[in-house]
Image (cartoon, helix red, strand yellow):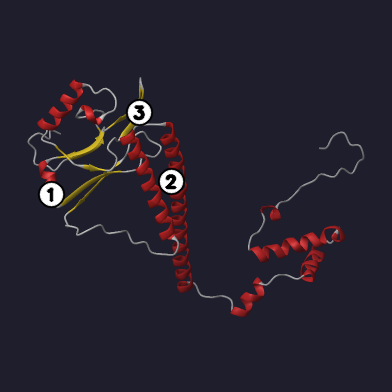
Amino acid sequence: MDIVGSDVPWLVVRDFNSVLNAHETTGNASTISCDDFRATLTVCDLIKIETNGVFHTRIGRGRRGIVLSRLDRAVCSHSFLTSWSQIACVTLPRSHSDNHLLLVSCSTCISSGTQPFKFQGSGIGDIAMDVTKANEKVMLIQGMIGSEGFSDDLFRLETTTLAYLDIVRKQQEIFFKENSRVKWLAEDLSIIKEHVPSLFTIDENALILRVLSFDEVRSMIFAMDYHCWEIMGQDVVLAMQDVFHTGRVFSGLNSNFLVLISKIQNALFVY
């Protein structure tokens, strides 16, 4: 689609694989590439959106070592710019990638100040704070890399901080999943209680769930087959009682072993 002369609001956010000026890279900037990039923005009538955060958005390797460049940016048309009261673009921490992601937010409301996120529920506030602090530390280190240049010490510090950021993000993900599971489980139970009639009284339910005694287990086993009870009886009772204590049935409880016992000594073949 041709955007030249179009009134359609356009927003382009990407890695343009080129810098606008030589100061946007620590490596060698191609004059032709910079001129072509600036000419493209002029012809398409696209406006640069000021990006807050880390200046260099990509870290790469050149012939002389590490090269920092500002390749990622957001540009928009005049119609897009006038469609919103507020437009903001910020860099996000670089994690498992050579590039910083860009986050563009647009609003038709004029904000009087920064509105913090409000988290509901026990525990989420601490986890969210850990993620926020880890993000801030990563951004600080990556900002130092951009302003002071790349070094082995900053590289090791960034690697350690990114590893910690991954850990707290994983904890946050697990917390959200667990909260979601508990919420759905509570809703399902409430629906079951509302629509499914109770088939047992409280006393009958307590009788069913109580732990079996030694004599009860022994009487059940003797009703079927009581061979070797003196050897394995105690283990059978403990296994049955563990089911009631923990609410879990171990996987081997219903396993069957079919053993062919030969009626002829020293048999060579079994048909």
Residues packed near mark 2 inside 10 Å, few (<14), some (14 to 19) or many (20 plus): many
Q: Earlier in the sequence, mark 1 or mark 2?
A: 1
Picture residue at 69% right of the left edge, 52% below the top = 252
Residue 165 circle label: 2
In the image: residue 109, left or right of residue 72: left
Task: State how far apart marks 3 and 1 are (Cα).
Answer: 36 Å
> Relative to residue 178, is residue 230 drawn left or right?
right
Q: Amino acid at mark 2?
A: Leu
Q: How many marks?
A: 3
Check disc 3 and report its element: helix, strand or loop.
strand
Q: Locate the N terminus by quadrant.
A: top left
Residue under label 3: 60
Position of 218 relative to 165 (above/below): below
Q: Is residue 190 visible?
A: yes
Q: CA distance from mark 3 to mark 2?
A: 22 Å
What amino acid is found at the position of numbered circle 3 in the picture?
Gly
Return the residue at label 1: 83
